[in-house]
Amino acid sequence: MASGLEQSGTGKSPNPSYVKNPHLDLMKEDFLYHFDLGTATHDLPAMFGDVKFVCVGGSSSRMKSFIQFIAGELKLGDPKDEYPNICAGTDRFAMYKVGPVLSVSHGMGVPSIAIMLHELIKLLHHARCSDVTLLRLGTSGGIGLEPGTVVITRQAVDGSFVPQFEQVILGKKVLRSTALDETLAEELLQCGKQLNDFETVIGDTMCTLDFYEGQARLDGAFCSYSEEDKRRYLNEAYRAGVRNIEMESTVFGAMCKMSGLQGAVVCVTLLDRLQGDQMTSSHDLLLGYQLRPQRLVGSYIKKKLNAV
């Protein structure tokens, strides 16, 4: 049987406790294996205590590009400089830092980002960080939107358009809320309007466990439905408020909710799934689209830091 939808407050406090695990207090050392960082081997407060913005994305190269971009935007370094990978001791994730901004890769899909977020939230806890904003920058398939549109997620929904993340824990299904911070979403939307360089919208994001059948594609190795079935499903998703599809947002929303971190998902659409399944735009055009989330998030970070 599934438990009731878990809730958690998001009120800020001077010294927030992002972790909700009493067992951590009993451990002499906490080794963050997939980051190759540990409480006994690294001075985490000295390394990360000033972090206020954590930006995460699937690709390690994209997150390296983002830290170079934000260094230039904040005038904290030369975008052409080489920024060291803090997690160079492991090949699972990559991590870069400049000033109060941390940039971390999370791989592809719910399991990969969930592992990263567990260790990231513990890292913020051990570093005694406060008032941190967590932003996921990514790519997605749009529904009824022009390619290149940036979607800010209102809430993440599963393949049945329900705003929940389901996980099996000790043999039981646990359902967790995936609602994201509405104020943060509106602030990001205003930044998009001020940039006035590409379309930015707020909508629901559907998170799937698969790139092919889970997203109603017709071009996978297996397919048991018709093109008419696919179109009917995607139109139903659009009517339910879904504007894009990716593979990480439900667990991202759930873990932001549980930890009390202010979070947002900002993804550019690379194609309109109502028009096809494969990306036919040129390589250069797709690269340009992928820069849009970082430009929007960079604008937001600059605005917040200038207001301090």
Image (tube, rainbow, N blue to C red):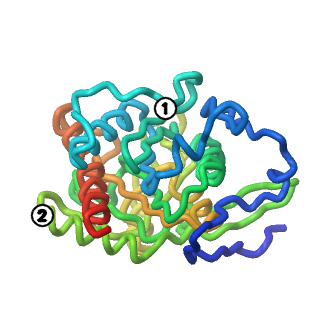
Would you identify the image quadrant in which residue 59 lies?
A: top left
How far apart are labels 1 and 2 at the CA level?
32 Å
The residue that mark 2 highlights is 196
Q: Find residue 46 and report its horizontal and vertical position in percent.
A: 54, 43
Q: Secondary structure at mark 1?
A: loop
As displayed, is residue 10 above or below residue 43? below
Counting labels gives: 2
Q: Secondary structure at mark 2?
A: loop
Q: Find residue 205 and report its horizontal and vertical position in percent.
A: 44, 62
As displayed, is residue 306 above or below residue 99? below
Pointers 1 and 2 in contact (C-beta within 8 Å)? no
Q: Find residue 254 and report its horizontal and vertical position in percent.
A: 61, 63
Report the amino acid beneath label 2: Asn
Q: Tell me the mark number nearer the camera, choosing from 1 and 2.
A: 1
Q: Quadrant of the C terminus?
A: bottom left
For the point 22% across and 34% down, which residue is it? 78
For the point 46% across and 61% down, which residue is it? 133
- Residue 19 in sight from this viewpoint: yes
Crowding at dot 1, Cα within 10 Å, few <14 / some 14-19 / many 20+, comes out as many
Report the amino acid beneath label 1: Ala
Q: Find residue 52 and report its horizontal and vertical position in percent.
A: 44, 57
Q: Relative to residue 217, is residue 196 drawn left or right?
A: left
Mark number for residue 94? Answer: 1
For the point 28% across and 46% down, which residue is it? 270
